[in-house]
Image (cartoon, rainbow, N blue to C red):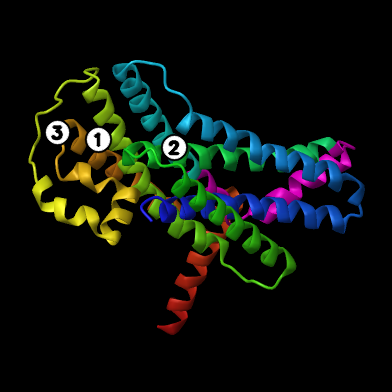
Amino acid sequence: MQLILPNFLIALREGVEAALVVGIIVAYINKVGRRDVLARFWIGVVLAAAIPLGLGIYWTWGPMTITFQAQEILGGVFSIVAALFVTWMIFWMGKNSRQLTANIHAEADQALESGNVHGLIWMGIVSVAREGAETAVMVWGVVKSSGTTQVWEPTIGVVLGLVAAIVIGYLIYRGSLHMNIHTFFTFTGYLLIFVAAGIFLYGFHDLQEASVLPGWGIFLWDHTAVITPLLQQWWFVILNAFFNLQYLFQPTALQLGAWIAYLVVVLPLFTLQIQGKIFVDKRTREEVDAAARAKVADKAEGE
């Protein structure tokens, strides 16, 4: 269970995003009567999903022929890059989730009007490939920071998450499931910020262990004895897999500082984005401003 649930939720989150984009494009293709491109579209989508996930599997569990220090350096650098990559993805989806359907339709219209059917196909391929890459990066970060070499638990979690995402995407496509997409990505965005913060912290842990950064072994406090009995508790195992809690019980100053700095910067920015104040689509900002003006007007009338 240690790695099934975290990877299930990661794959579910990324899979739903990809399934929404694919579903919107397929619905649009059917609507404009261009079913002739569907076969090529689905081939592209399958390849776009398989290639980055396959590379992620090799990256995570492939043969290691480098020294321990080199492994730690690569692990530290990749962990920090993964955290920043996930952060970018969170803000990108926060910007586009409100207008996802409209934006995709606009790009699809442009592709078809120019006669560029392959452009429409590439929209789906790029979207799915991006989500596949993000899933691979997140799963690698969770598995690496857990210190485990298990293959089956992360694999089961990812497969179940992708299957659930496909089902949700299909139900949304068929109109039998009404989901507030913006709320879904807001909730999972906050969750992933804390996951990314843990991966960010772990990146500095690896770089210190490799002696690239100073301060290894000089801990601010050491409460590992407190969590030792908890390491066998399923609920702590899951939380630890998500957020790397074990490192917060024995942090160096640099590790704790990196974790706090990440949250202090990213959480307020994401909250402001959710409120429609920064990093938002122009149409979204106009909607937020209009809603604010209407609220003020209603309050004035009530008085």
State left or right for residue 253 relative to residue 285: left
The foreground one among 75 and 92 is 75
State left or right for residue 147 relative to residue 107: left
Q: Tag 1: Cα neighbours inside 10 Å, few (<14), some, or many (≥20)?
A: some
Q: What secondary structure is found at the residue carrying circle 1?
A: helix
What residue range appears in magenta? Answer: 91-117
- Measured in 3D between alpha carbons, the distance from the residue under mark 3 to the one under mark 1, in whole angstroms, is 8 Å
Q: Residue 219 carries which label?
A: none
Q: Is residue 105 magenta?
A: yes
Q: Which of marks 3 and 1 is nearer the N terminus?
A: 3
- Identified by mark 2, the residue type is Trp
Q: Residue 140 carries which label?
A: 2
Q: Earlier in the sequence, mark 3 or mark 2?
A: 2
Quadrant position of residue 217: top left
Q: Does the magenta stretch include residue 138?
A: no
The foreground one among 88 and 218 is 218
Q: Which-is-in-front pick, marks 3 and 2?
A: 2
Q: What secondary structure is found at the residue carrying circle 3?
A: helix
Q: Percent x, y for residue 95?
A: 53, 48
Can the viewer see residue 28?
A: yes
Q: Percent x, y for residue 115?
A: 90, 37
Q: What type of secondary structure mainly makes up the magenta span?
A: helix
Is residue 198 placed above or below 78 in the rendered structure? below
Q: Which of marks 2 and 1 is nearer the N terminus?
A: 2
Q: Which mark is residue 258?
A: 1
